[in-house]
Image: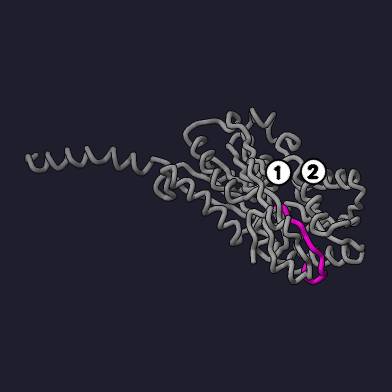
């Protein structure tokens, strides 16, 4: 063999193991389980990816994203979760409790992180918030006592209200404890709670029709996947029936709703990157405590108040963290 050919062969042999390694090296895979694909969830996903970049993780370079979706159909979530598990992700992001229930049924080994987690102990996700102990952890923005505070806020919006409507999403597991707490608070305050059950967005109009016929003076909307996705329809139905409505998410107010009191979900999704980073580096989700946001914000839409011919008290406006003119 000539010297030039021999040197070339050595170079090829030196390169081959590196090339083979590059081909077999697997990037960490982050799975995202959609309830539905919409602009709001795209915003939340963007906040997660922003947080990952801040921690030095670039999508495509350092990890890859895989997705499945239930296309807004609750009954399709179990199948979507199974499909995501088959993609073999290193971690599953179940954005909220509804998706988490399906993901947990699909796997008890792949880590699951839930940015908007409710009743984690009651639903069997964790042994305790401090020591989850299984394959699920997350952030719990459903502060105990918050639904009762929203009820009190409804009475500030409509002083002396004795009949308060409740838009109740019976398909979402995180809605059940909210209804129980609001009904218990209603008894203490001697307020009649009038529930209107909904299962899909198509039920919203008829729910507001029923509440109006039922003589309610103000409405509280539960925090749920379907209801936040349908926030524009709810705002339109509330305006059509001239029913002041209190929400737990600011997104409702941004879409034309009257007033919200609750945790800013943007911060929950941005914080998710911290957990993803930890889990991809080997920390078990069972060793990562469930976090509880401490900041609650009050947001008021004065344009919506005007359309309802409603006067919001200066005291309440002064307490607001944000006022939409």
Q: Which residue is drawn at 71% across and 41% down?
A: 143
Magenta stretch contains residue 247: yes
What kind of colouring is applied to the model shown?
one colour
In the rendered image, the quadrant that contains the N terminus is top left
Say the numbered circle drawn on residue 142. 1
| Above or below 243: residue 150 | above
Residue 52 belongs to magenta span: no
CA gap, disc 1 and disc 2: 10 Å
The answer to which image quadrant residue 214 occupies is bottom right
| Residue named by callout 2 | 177
Instruction: Give the mark toward the camera: 1 or 2.
Output: 1
- Magenta region, residue range: 238-248
User: Residue 223: x percent and y percent?
Assistant: 73, 51
Residue 127 in the image, given as x and y percentages of width and height: 69, 29
- Residue 58 marker: none
Front residue (pair 99, 12)? 99
Q: For the residue carrying disc 1, how many other residues have a C-alpha within 10 Å: few (<14), some (14-19), or many (20+)?
A: many
The residue positioned 52% from the left and 35% from the top of the image is: 279
Per the image, label 1 sits on a secondary structure element best described as loop
- Judge whether residue 263 can be spotted in this image: yes
Q: In the rendered view, would you say 24 is above or below 32?
A: above
Quadrant assignment, res 113: top right
In contact (CB < 8 Å): disc 1 and disc 2 = yes
- Residue 308 lies left or right of residue 80; in this view the side is right
Report how many numbered discs are placed on residues in the image: 2
Q: Is residue 76 among what the camera can see?
A: no
Of residues 226 and 290, the one drawn nearer to the viewer in this rendering = 290
Instruction: Give neighbour class at mark 2: few <14, some 14-19, many 20+ (Cα, 10 Å).
Output: some
């Amino acid at each position: 063999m000539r010297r030039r050919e021999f040197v070339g062969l050595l170079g090829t042999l030196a390169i081959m193991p590196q090339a083979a390694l590059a081909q077999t090296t697997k990037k960490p895979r982050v799975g995202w389980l959609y309830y539905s694909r919409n602009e709001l969830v795209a915003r939340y996903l963007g906040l997660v990816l922003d947080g990952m970049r801040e921690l030095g993780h670039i999508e495509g370079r350092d990890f890859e994203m895989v997705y499945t979706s239930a296309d807004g159909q609750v009954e399709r979530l179990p199948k979507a979760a199974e499909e995501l598990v088959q993609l073999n992700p290193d971690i599953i992001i179940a954005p909220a409790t509804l998706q988490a229930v399906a993901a947990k049924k699909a796997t008890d080994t792949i880590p699951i992180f839930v940015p908007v987690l409710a009743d984690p102990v009651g639903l069997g996700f964790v042994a305790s918030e401090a020591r989850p102990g299984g394959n699920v952890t997350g952030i719990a923005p459903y502060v105990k006592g918050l639904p009762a505070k929203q009820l009190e806020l409804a009475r500030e919006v409509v002083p002396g209200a004795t009949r308060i409507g409740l838009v109740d999403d019976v398909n979402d597991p995180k809605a059940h404890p909210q209804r129980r707490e609001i009904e218990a608070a209603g008894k203490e305050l001697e307020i009649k709670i009038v529930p209107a059950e909904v299962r899909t967005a198509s039920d919203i109009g008829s729910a507001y029709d029923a509440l109006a016929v039922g003589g309610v003076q103000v409405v509280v909307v539960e925090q749920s996947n379907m209801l936040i996705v349908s926030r524009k329809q709810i705002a339109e139905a509330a305006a059509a029936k001239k029913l002041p409505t209190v929400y737990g998410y600011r997104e409702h107010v941004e879409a034309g709703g009257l007033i919200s009191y609750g945790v800013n979900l943007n911060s929950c999704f941005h914080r998710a990157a911290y957990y993803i980073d930890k889990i991809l580096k080997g920390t078990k989700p069972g060793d990562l405590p469930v976090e509880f946001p401490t900041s609650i914000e009050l947001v008021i839409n004065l344009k919506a108040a005007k359309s309802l011919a409603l006067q919001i008290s200066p005291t309440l406006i002064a307490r607001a963290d944000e006022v939409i003119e």
